[in-house]
């Protein structure tokens, strides 16, 4: 074991790098115990940008524990939920309505959410053990995400722009460019 690995053994949290005039960059480091021993997950992120607040994610886990099993503490070789929701807070209401609708459709005992993220400016909600009705409802929510600001949830003047495509309202675009 190297000194770096030893130092990481008890570490969970963010290593933050500040650069004047640039967004706050961070490396999230999380220890996950696996059958093969501890594993350290590193994920580059911009604070306040591309990750939903843990408090919001935890509400999903409380309401639908079997669907979101592995959220934050799962083995990343088995579920991408180990990384949390990889989208911003603005889609929280959209995701909550989606889960409530899935619950009404009766997805079955094998239903699991495997990953929640933003990709190419749109929501991706990957599942297993689904049926056609649930799949269709997920598709509707993914389409709605292109009309909903990922950062504040607004449906006013929303576009998908940038070299890294994000879906933002005019106000959030102006904040980003300020």
Image (spheres, rainbow, N blue to C red):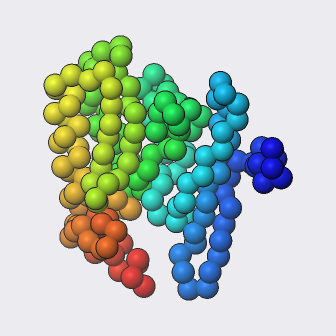
Q: Residue at x 60, y 64 (%)?
A: 26
The location of residue 71, given as percent across then percent down, is: 52, 35
* Most distant residue in the top direction: 109
Q: Which part of the image, by quadrant, shows the C terminus? A: bottom left
Q: Which part of the image, by quadrant, shows the N terminus? A: top right
* Most distant residue in the front direction: 1
Q: Residue at x 66, y 39 (%)?
A: 39
The location of residue 8, given as percent across then percent down, is: 76, 49
- Quarter of the image for residue 169 reads bottom left
Q: Residue at x 60, y 52 (%)?
A: 42
The location of residue 47, given as percent across then percent down, is: 55, 64
Asked whether the viewer can see residue 62, the reply is no
- Work out whether 131 lies above or below 154: above
Front in this rendered view, residue 74 or 65: 74
The location of residue 89, given as percent across then percent down, is: 42, 54
- Work out whether 113 lies above or below 143: above
Q: Residue at x 32, y 65 (%)?
A: 166
Asked whether the viewer can see residue 66, the reply is yes
Front in this rendered view, residue 97 or 66: 66
- Image position of 131 (left or right of 42): left
Q: How many marks?
A: 0
- Work out whether 103 lies above or below 143: above
């Amino acid at each position: 074991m190297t000194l770096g690995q030893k130092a990481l053994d008890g570490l969970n949290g963010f290593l933050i790098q500040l650069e004047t005039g640039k967004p706050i960059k961070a490396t999230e480091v999380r220890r996950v115990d696996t059958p093969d021993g501890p594993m350290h997950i590193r994920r580059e992120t911009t604070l306040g940008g591309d990750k939903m607040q843990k408090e919001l994610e935890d509400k999903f886990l409380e309401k639908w524990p079997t669907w979101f099993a592995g959220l934050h503490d799962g083995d990343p070789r088995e579920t991408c939920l180990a990384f949390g929701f990889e989208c911003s807070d603005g889609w929280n209401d959209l995701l909550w309505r989606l889960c409530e609708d899935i619950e009404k459709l009766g997805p079955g005992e094998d239903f699991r959410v495997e990953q929640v993220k933003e990709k190419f400016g749109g929501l991706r909600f990957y599942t297993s053990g689904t049926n056609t009705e649930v799949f269709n409802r997920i598709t509707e929510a993914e389409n709605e995400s292109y009309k909903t600001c990922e950062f504040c949830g607004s449906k006013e003047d929303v576009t998908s722009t940038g070299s890294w495509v994000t879906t933002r309202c005019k106000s959030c675009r102006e904040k980003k460019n300020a």
